[in-house]
Image (cartoon, rainbow, N blue to C red):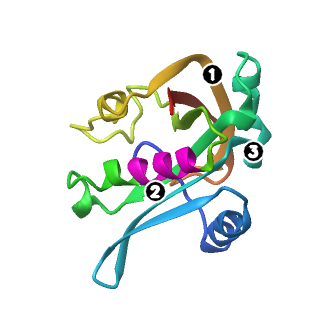
Amino acid sequence: FRDWPYLYDGDRAYERRYLEQFAVAPDAIIVAAFDGERMVGAATGAAMTGHFEEFAAPFAARGFDPARIFYCAESVLLPDYRGRGLGHRFFDEREAHARTLGTYHHAAFCAVIRPDDHPLKPSGYRPLNAFWAKRGYRPVDGAIAHFAWTDVGEAAETEKPMQFWMKPL
């Protein structure tokens, strides 16, 4: 998440604590991609109700039951492994997991919203909107959460808007 558009400047201790939630959370899944013994990517998912309240609130406000939404949280993949179908596999595995549980009617995730003229936006950057739409996800009108983290090169956390996308399972 250090790359555009997240620009997340986190630390291993926080990430370890965060991922430990998935190891013990009911209905959670962690999917990892390996090249030999080297981990090259990972994706997580869990019940929306087991995540931050700020993430469930926009759905409840729009009449969706957060208990019926499976949250496809992080997907990270090293740059050299992108464009090889692993991103699709991450979604396939999480969606299949959610379906087998029989509790969830929708899958959702959120993506940070950054201004088009942001100074750290790389030239030639292609957003993932077309990838997500091809998988059946659509932005949920007005479903925006705000979450704070420290950007690369910044000294303090700032709040960022996160647009939710959702699809029926």
Q: Amino acid at mark 1?
A: Ala
| Residue at left offset 34%, top offset 53% | 89
User: Horizontal and vertical percent for residue 123?
Assistant: 24, 38
Q: Relative to residue 9, is residue 96 drawn left or right? A: left
Q: Secondary structure at mark 1?
A: strand
Q: Report which residue position mark 3 lands on.
A: 52
**Most common secondary structure along the magenta stretch:** helix
**Residue that badge 2 annotates:** 2
Viewer can see residue 152: yes
Say which label, 2 or 1, has the lower sequence index.
2
Q: Which residue is mark 1?
A: 143
Helix, strand or loop for disc 3:
loop
**Picture quarter containing residue 162?**
top right
Q: Position of residue 75 (x, y in %)?
A: 45, 53
Please state the horizontal and vertical placement of residue 3, each as a whole percent of the image.
40, 53
Please state the extent of the stretch shown in magenta in the rendering.
91-100
Q: What type is the residue that disc 3 sits on? A: Phe
